[in-house]
Image: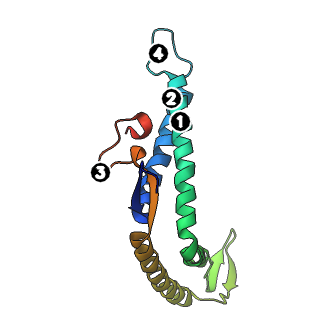
Amino acid sequence: MPEDASQINLSRALKLKNRVVHRLSQLDSLITTYNSTQEDNQEYDTRELYKTRTSVAAFLTELKTAINLANQPIQKVIFELAECKALIAMLNKINTKNGSNLEGYPAVHVTYVAQIRKSEIDREVKRIEQEIDRLQDELDRFNYKTLIAIDRSAFQDEEPSTTPLYEL
């Protein structure tokens, strides 16, 4: 590990990644909003903001790469978790209308037959949610115990860095 690197667990690295993504969004907004302003209102130096954005984006790329490499042993669990969540989203969209209804103008008697009933969907969603909890617990344990190296100058324990990289 290089001298200017620190080790943090994946849980912390993921939180840091989210902060960096948010910072990039802030910089993008400042650059696009304040690049062309009235002559007497030069509140931000967008060239400097652009330089900062470039360095933040480079750090984010390195951080994402380190996270991706560290996640390889648990990638299957990550994919399973995503598919379980997608399955619940799909199940919640299924039309379960069943029985006779009056519809339209003039009212017409229509009978619907749901092949999968709401009670079945509710049971399946509950079962999948239990699987999501199991997978998430496994992922949380992995993220807590797995360490990655990051540039120490870009990260400090609970305090934002004094460099423009993480000004909030």
Q: Residues within 10 Å of mark 3 (few under 14, many from 20)?
A: few
Instruction: Give me the C-alpha separation between circle 4 and circle 2.
Output: 13 Å
Of the image marks 3 and 2, the number of the one nearer the N terminus: 2
Indicate the secondary structure of the residue bearing disc 4: loop
Q: Quadrant of residue 9?
A: bottom left
Image height check: is 93 above or below 111?
above
Instruction: Give me the C-alpha separation between circle 4 and circle 1.
Output: 19 Å
Q: What quarter of the picture does the C terminus occupy?
A: top left
The residue wearing badge 1 is 53
The residue wearing badge 4 is 42
Of the image marks 3 and 4, the number of the one nearer the N terminus: 4
Indicate the secondary structure of the residue bearing disc 3: loop
Query: Tell me, what colour scheme is on the image?
Result: rainbow
**Residue 3 in the figure: left or right of residue 108:** left
| Residue type highlighted by circle 2 | Leu
Indicate the secondary structure of the residue bearing disc 1: helix
| Residue type highlighted by circle 3 | Glu
Q: Residues within 10 Å of mark 1 (few under 14, many from 20)?
A: many
Image height check: is 124 above or below 70?
below
Work out whether residue 85 can be spotted: no
Which dot marks residue 158?
3
Which dot marks residue 49?
2
| Residue type highlighted by circle 1 | Arg
Q: Residues within 10 Å of mark 2 (few under 14, many from 20)?
A: some
Instruction: Give me the C-alpha separation between circle 1 and circle 3.
Output: 22 Å
**Residue 156 in the figure: left or right of residue 36:** left
Q: Are marks 2 and 1 in contact (CB under 8 Å)?
A: yes
- Residue 11, position as x, y percentages in the image: 41, 64
Q: Quadrant of residue 36?
A: top right
Of the image marks 4 and 1, the number of the one nearer the N terminus: 4
Q: Quadrant of residue 167?
A: top left
Q: Nearer the viewer, residue 54 or 124?
A: 54
